[in-house]
Image: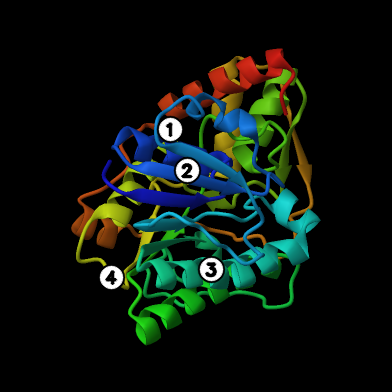
Amino acid sequence: MRGTVIVTGGAGFIGSHLCERFLREGFRVIAMDSLLTGSLDNIAHLFEMEGFKFIKYDVTNFIYVKEDIDIILHFACPASPADYLKHPIHTMKVDSIGTLNTLGLAKAKKARYLLASTSEVYGDPEVHPQPESYWGRVNPIGPRSVYDEAKRFAEAMAMAYHREHGIDVRIARIFNTYGPRMRLDDGRVIPNFITQALRGEPLTVYGDGSQTRSFCYIDDLVEGIYRLATYDGLNGEVLNLGNPEEYSVIELARIIIDLLKSSSSVVYKPLPQDDPRRRRPDITKAMKLLNWRPITPLLEGLTRTVEYFRRRGKEGGK
């Protein structure tokens, strides 16, 4: 075995794919998840694999682990607006107390630490595309601040541990990611559109649909995170990970309707407060330091995601 990795949020969408990848690379993996938004269905196939362990645990509580730990990936947090608006206080606790607890574990175990941050730290940006040097434009008391500001605090906490205690910290600012193991009721735009199109329902577009997003397929994101977590010489680095191809929300709706040959129309609803107008990562640093860039075309990734959603729908999953 190459070492032991803890993945908090290990039963979630991204976390479960990371558990799978690190196991495949020869690591022992300990997945921690409270199952608030994660699901054992995402990791059921891993229980038979050598070196995998699952602990149902809320990381806002003190964490004790007997094993030696080499890498901690802190991915525990509701990430969909539908989830973090439903659980606002817990979201802030996971990214504050949970970050403190996992950093404390990294200090105790002398482990490398990777924080899952988000493009939301840029808020509704005035700089486009967004480089890591941009400080962001966030409403600190708006409804989305429970996620935006919590992640900004988590970044500050991680860098404080890096500077004061010498912890090997890396921060991934993750842009919109999609793929298999997203929940059908996730609430983010791609799951919403696919679910509605499969049912023949109107696709819900907020605002006029001109706001833009950049969509990264899960396999590409996992490759970037794996490199960021395992490459040497990246202590203290903050990297954007996402796909720089930019689509308007209405473009995405039409692509999905065409892909599914759906009879769905589009219905427009008011834009939520503080919803970003444009979102696109500058991945220059990731390309230079990790030799990484996304390779999965949107149509290919959407096709795989639709297949998963169709299967889950037949199984009665959420």
Measured as percent of width and height from the top left, residue 241 is found at 38, 54
Residue 231 percent location from the top left of the image: 23, 56
Q: CA distance from mark 1 to mark 3?
A: 24 Å
Amino acid type indicated by mark 4:
Asn
The C terminus appears in which quarter of the rendering? top right
Residue located at (19% from left, 58% from top) = 288
Which residue is drawn at the image coordinates 51% and 74% (left, top)?
136
Question: What is the CA distance from the residue labelled 2 to the residue labelled 1?
Answer: 7 Å
Q: Is residue 53 left or right of residue 111?
A: right
For disc 3, the marked residue is 121
Q: Amino acid at mark 1?
A: Leu
Query: Which one is closest to the eye, mark 1 or mark 4?
Result: 4
Residue indicated by mark 2: 215
Type of amino acid at the residue the image marks with label 2: Phe
Secondary structure under tag 3 reads helix
Pointers 3 and 4 in contact (CB under 8 A)? no
Q: Which of the two residues, 64 or 10, is positioned nearer the viewer here?
A: 64
Q: Would you name the residue on which mark 4 appears?
A: 235
Q: Position of residue 100 (x, y in %)?
A: 55, 73
Residue at image mark 1: 298
The earlier-in-sequence mark between 2 and 3 is 3
Q: Residues within 10 Å of mark 3 (few under 14, many from 20)?
A: many
